[in-house]
Amino acid sequence: MAQPQALADAIARDNTARLAALEDDYAALGRMLERRGVSIEAVTARVGALAIALPSWGLGVGGTRFARFALPGEPTTVFEKLDDCAVVHALCRMTPTVSLHFPWDRPADPAALKDHAAALGLGFDAVNSNTFQDQPGQPLSYRFGSLSHPDPRVRDQAVEHNLDCIALGAGLGADAITVWVADGANFPGQQDHVRAWDRYLDSLSRIYAALPDGWRMFLEHKHFEPAFYATVNSDWGISMLTAQALGPKALCLVDLGHHAPTVNVEQIVARLHRFGKLGGFHFNDSKYGDDDLDSGAIDPHRLFLVFNELVEAERRSPPGAFRPAYMMDQSHNITDPIESLLSSAGAIAAAFARALVVDREALAAAQDACDPMLGFTLLRRAFSVDVEPILAMARLRQGAAVDPLSAYRTSGWRQAKARQRRPAGAGAGIVNEEPAAP
Ligand SMILES: [Mn+2]
């Protein structure tokens, strides 16, 4: 079942109705870009090759500290979540892999999960460990930390969990692990900043030593929450120093929502790459903190500036060497997760497409000539291009939807699942509290 028939039919019907207008818009945009010396076909090809991993936890409806509002037909098992991932991918052809989170997604039968994904045409991206909450029956608590906990037995337990995630991921065909820990302090005096980091590094080095050949370890920093005074891996600086101490397989992961509101994230991206430590992204957007809103929902310009640095970084890299792991990390509290993921995929692709139409020679010349207004104008000129025809054409050529939201809604997927799937619980938190296996 690569694609449900009702979905394929909806895509085909919707695309047929929109084809003439798309071809008209695409031709007009192509002429405009040609006058700027940009080949629309080259941009469309790059956009068509963009791949972003879906977070398994993003397919269920999220929640806040206050409530979670279940959606009829939302997935409650990892198998159902993969089914929904396949729907997203069928509609946008930009999300061929899934990032699993253990133990939430721990399958009773890993081979069955791998087969299910393969049948859907999906692969697995980085796996994520979870030492930020206690699991039923877990001997020791992570209340006061995990990899940096003062008690070596807690650290051993957290390291063991990460090794287990690597083994599970390797069996599924993944080749990276993302480590985010909630370790930190709520009060001045609660912990020693230096000793806590030393313990964190020591635990990480044990996980690093167990990485299979070809694997990478992504360190995800976050400046606050759930620790509200100090976080062990708080920002890109300590994350990069940690990655440098560990070795070449350790890289930094930038979650766009894990910085203080005024931090210049695009500059961080440029510098991490300059020092060989840019591992990947968790795309999302925020206005206040780690809001996990849909990508580009609040500040599409910042997303564009991030991609502007990524395009620059790729140009500075040897051919084929630039391969950051792109993932979404969002919490959909009031929308259908499939619709939000499609919206984000479109926003990410748009930012990438706009970054690709920047006149880079003129930009470098303006920078060297100390011409700030021209440099700024060159970026703004690219940002103001409506690249929707490029995205739609890239999708159409791969059999996906010209208008993903419209095709999805007419497919009736969620309504059908509301009749077939068992209802999800309403407990608070970003993930359903249902057993992961069917
Ligand atoms: Mn994240």
Image (tube, rainbow, N blue to C red):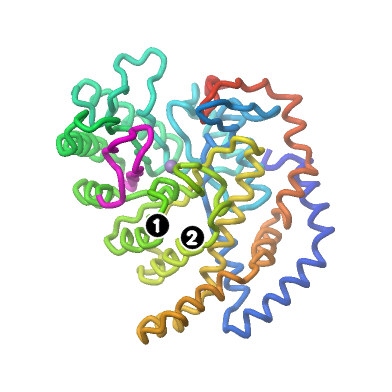
State which region is magenta: 213-237
Find disc 2 in the rendering and name its residue.
302
Q: Earlier in the sequence, mark 1 or mark 2?
A: 1
Identify the residue at image location x=33%, y=33%: 227
* Residue 114, horizontal then vertical, whole percent: 52, 34
Three-letter amino acid code at the position of disc 2: Arg
Classify residue 371 by image quadrant.
bottom left
Q: Is residue 357 left or right of residue 320?
A: right
- Quarter residue 45 falls in: bottom right
Q: Would you name the residue on which mark 1 appears?
A: 265
Q: Residue 353: image x %, image y %?
A: 56, 66
Q: Residue at x 53, y 63 (%)?
A: 352
Tell which of 385 and 313 is nearer to you: 385
In this view, which residue lies farthest toward the front? Answer: 188
Task: Report the front residue among 256 and 353.
Answer: 256
**Do labels 1 and 2 touch, CB within 8 Å?**
yes
Residue 92: where, in percent of width, then height? 65, 52
